[in-house]
Amino acid sequence: MGRLPSRVLHRVRRRRLRFLGHVSARSRIAHGRHEVRHGRDSPGHPRRLVGCFPPGAAVSEVIREDRPQLSDEAAVYVRELIVSGQLRPGTFIRLDRLATALSMSVTPVRQALVTLRGEGFVQLEPRRGFQVAQLREDDILDLFAVQAFVAGELAAHAAERITDEQIARLKAILTDLEAAMKRGDPASAEAMAHEFHEVVFDAADRPKLVWLMQISGRYEPRRFYANITGWEPLSIREHKTILSALKKRDVDQARHTMAGHVQNLGRIVASNFAATGEPPIRELDSKST
């Protein structure tokens, strides 16, 4: 799982996009009730507006205009809304409404959308503005196939170089992951899963491969898997298998288990995207490798 700098992700996770424009007051109230009751976003996807809450987002705090990387924060927001299926292909993104929702000026928002246009997430329609580009389920699967290959290579390198201290750290992370699961804290469990990958990739000592993971990781929504039925036990089982291969310094097994794990994550994201933003309820165990 590639990740953006933690300081950017920390700020992004503490923001929330607010419904504006074409959403009625009644629908906003209903959405809020749904979120409180179920701990996730409502299944509605209104067109021609920026408006869905990122999964697990906390109450927003004011973003200061003098803070750097505002355009990066806006890009992370919109990118995750698109990949998680909350902003559907064809949706027009209003710069002014997005800027208001993020408490920043239009300038960094426009810069963010230009960046996303270069990445293929949005397109610019003359006299109409930025529109979410077409993104198919197969596109997501293809991207995760590439990510799975890179992650597998990183795990293989890690198996050759990992230290006893790093093995101990991975064990502690899995303990924390299981504890978070038992106390009903899926967001923390997902954070532990991301940290597990960070330790493995750090052990690999292959900065260019890590960079490729960070690039491909833009297509992976944050704080998303915790909303998927069956994700937690699947995650525990697969991470334990990866750790076992690393402990044995088994290069081939580490490569195989990590690649299969990331491919499973890609299936989850693609299934969610195909379901127009609602987490898939299907049994995930049958897709474990």
Image (tube, helix red, strand yellow):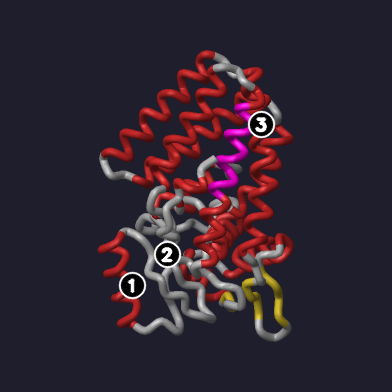
Q: Residue at x 46, y 29 (%)?
A: 240
Rendered view: 36 above or below 156:
below
Which image quadrant is residue 106 in? Answer: bottom right
Residue 61 part of the magenta-drawn span: no
User: Residue 142, how many percent across, how many down?
Assistant: 68, 54
Q: Residue at x 38, y 65 (%)?
A: 41
Pointer 1 local density, CA inside 10 Å: few below 14, some 14–19, many at least 20: many
Extreme-front residue of the structure = 286
In this rendering, does residue 74 appear at all? no
Is label 2 in contact with label 1 (beta carbons under 8 Å)? yes
Residue under label 1: 31
For the C terminus, which image quadrant? Answer: top right
Report the disc number at residue 53. Answer: 2
Report the disc number at residue 263. Answer: none
Q: Residue at x 37, y 69 (%)?
A: 42
User: Of the residues tagged 2 and 3, which is closer to the observer?
Assistant: 3
Q: Which residues are magenta?
A: 253-265
Residue under label 3: 154
